[in-house]
Image (tube, grey):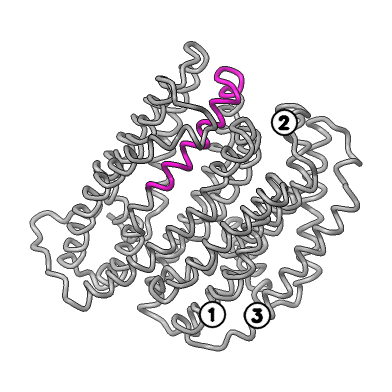
Amino acid sequence: MTKKTRTQKAFYNSVSPLILFTMKLIMQFVNRTLFIKYLGIYYLGLNGVFSNVLGMLSLAELGFGISIIYALYKPIAENKKEKVLAYMNLYSKAYKFIAIIIFLIGIVVYPFLPTILQTTSLNFEETCIYFLFLINSIVGYLLFSYKRGLLIANQENYIVSWLEFVLYFLITICQWLVMIFTQNYIFVLILTICYSISSNLLIAFVANKRYSLVNIVPDALTQEEKNSLKKNVLGNILGKISGFVVFSTDNILISTFISVTTVGLYSNYTIITTSFATLINQIMVSQTASVGNLIHTSSSDKVYEVFKRYHFINFAISYIVSILIFVLINPFITIWLGDEYLFKQEVVAILSIYFFMHNYRNAGFIVRDAYGLYWESRYKPIAEAVSNLVFSLLFLVVFKWGISGILLGTICSNLLTNTWYEPYIIFKYGLKMTIKEYIWINIQQWAVYFSTLLGLYFLAPQKWFDPSLLGWLQLAVVLGSSLIVVLLIVFHKDATFRWWLNFVKQAFIKIRRK
């Protein structure tokens, strides 16, 4: 097997999500259209609520997987298979225990579901649906889910992505047929469980083939390694709790204080925003293992230069996509589903800000995870989770701002915590250098985003084009091109931007030579 370089692996990890994104997004839209047509908006809302409830139960994982992957960077870089095996054995035991915990908590949560769904009790079908969700949540922990961590730590996320997509494609086609011919949501969920089982078994098989740890005696973890792992797991526990409160309680709050049907309407927007957020996240966070390897082989100055490059490209992508969402999402939903599925443009503006602020942090996640700064970040998630819940309930219950209130709650908590504390931790404990330049970079980029958003809010360019698919495509091309021009004008003197232009130029020259 020819060994790929760190740069090659970073390239494959970046390109694979781009290729898979378009195919998967098309399938998701077809799936959502068939779901609404054959199963209905109520089941769509039920799907969103149960997904969030079971997302809460995944807190039992406690960030153990992320901590183990970080711990694997060093022994993999030093080719110490005995130490790798020791961590993988611990990984396996922990995940089996976690599966049991999630199942037990799932049983305890069940009696509280009628309150969330605003009903007196769950009928037989709703009960079956919930427990199928629960089974799907634990099956990965029981069936070698930890094996994918070995591929990720070896900078081979792209292998995981392609294997999962092939199985996703096959299972999704089967789900479409089931929806069309049976209109039975339970059968659809059974196929989802089949996907979870088959994907974990296949990835485990590939991981064993590529990185066999057979006939190796594990090297016992030292007390220092155990203490480091415990601290990182504890730091990740708080991060997982915060992540759930901030990003996974929306549907629960909407269902509890508004309605399950509204969850379904909101999910038509989030299928778009989440798809793009996942794409950006995969492109960026897939570089974590490469940066982790770089940290153990280069200086902090080199790591900082690489970080600035990732930070700029992440900003550029987040800026363009969030502005496109603001202008294009309502016209798209009108064409796709109809005017009755729309939210007001003010809500969409807040959704765009929510999207931008969330995705703007991705480059920081790369460095934080590569340095393993989970323990140092332990206080931030607590403040973020508490402030998010307080603001969301204040805007939702007291001011009655509905969906806008929930999104504003997340934006406010982000401003109070993440925007300054995450960079502070990265520069103080990771890079160990001054943060002044980074602050100025952030001010410039945020100013460009909000100026563009405000200008387009008043200009309303979506009104200038024909309300048809062709008109929508024309608007998308004109707007996308305009945003790229804005970046070229504003940042043409920026050294990091010029590096990316040169990178693209050199890549284009190599392609032409071939």
Q: Mark 3 or mark 1, which has the lower sequence index?
A: 1
Q: Mark 2 or mark 3, which has the lower sequence index?
A: 2
Left or right relative to 183: residue 411? right
Residue occupied by mark 1:
424
| Residue ID at (82%, 48%) | 478
Quarter location, residue 483 = bottom right
Residue 289 horizontal/vertical position (percent): 39, 65
In the displayed structure, 145 sits above or below 487; it is above
Residue occupied by mark 2:
341
Depth check, front residue: 378 or 351: 378
Residue 415 horizontal/vertical position (percent): 64, 68
Amino acid type at mark 1? Tyr
CA separation in Å, label 2 and label 1: 42 Å
At numbered mark 3, what does the secondary structure look like: helix, strand or loop? helix
Query: What number is the disc on residue 407?
Result: none
At numbered mark 2, what does the secondary structure look like: helix, strand or loop? helix
Left or right relative to 504: residue 61? left
Residue 174 appears anywhere in the view: no
Q: What segment carries the magenta color?
A: 34-57
Depth check, front residue: 336 or 228: 228
| Residue ID at (82%, 55%) | 482
